[in-house]
Image (cartoon, grey):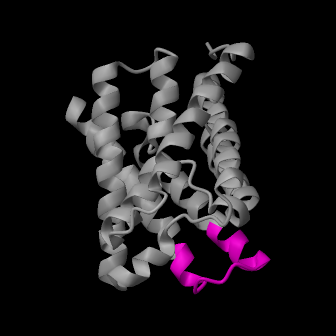
Amino acid sequence: MVINKYLAEFMGTLILVFGGSMGILAVGGATGAAEIIAIALAFGLSLLAGIWALGHVSGAHFNPAVTLGMLLDGRISLSDSIGYWVSQFAGGAVASLLVAGASSTDIVAGTMTTFSDRGTAILVEVALTAIFVWVVMAALRSGGTAAPAAIALTLVGVHLAGIPFSGTSVNPARSFGPALVSGNFDDLWVYIVFPLVGALVAFGLYRLFPVAEEA
């Protein structure tokens, strides 16, 4: 059923954003090396859980930037892409509502992606999203049992690299949820626009270095 794909994207994005956000809360807002590792693992392992639970239903995009890459590559229709995007943003919002229920609306603001320098954050978001979406596109095309781990570990890696510079979104739905629930939309556009730009770059890289689908 088509609706199951949209529900899977909703639930998978919810798992990703909720698990990652709770990881941020668990370290108490600290930003030392150990805390960055913990947050990166929280997002990566939450994504892995979503892939294992729901990947067979929707393909486990859980990220509007990933869906854009798949749309450009012809792997998903425009109508399904719109359904995926709505489901992903809704999943991110509900995840942040759950975080608020476990803590408070003010604390949800602490799970937002933030930066100290806009130019650096834009560069980092474009570059890291491009890497992540490129890996997703390649891993899902080649198939195999290693694909979920490759995708999840790449998300861990981009968080390790990007948290000090952009907070690491690489996913508009991940940033939208906390912004909506906390009512703080400052600089949200950076985390909406530039991960999508990164997806365009990823598509170009994937077409430059195509992957043959396994038989």
- Between 151 and 160, the residue placed more toward the observer is 160
Res 105 quadrant in image: bottom left
94 shown above or below 125: below
Whether residue 140 sits left or right of residue 176 in the image: it is: right
- Between 99 and 138, the residue placed more toward the observer is 99
Whether residue 206 sits left or right of residue 57 in the image: it is: right
Residue 45 image point, x, y percent: 58, 60
93 shown above or below 75: below
Which image quarter holds the C terminus? Answer: top right
Q: How many marks?
A: 0
- Between 185 and 107, the residue placed more toward the observer is 185
**Can residue 60 be seen by looking at this rendering?**
no
Q: Residue at x 66, y 66 (%)?
A: 116
Q: Residue at x 64, y 23 (%)?
A: 142
Q: Is residue 184 magenta?
A: no
Q: Residue at x 55, y 52 (%)?
A: 48
Q: Which residues are magenta?
A: 23-39
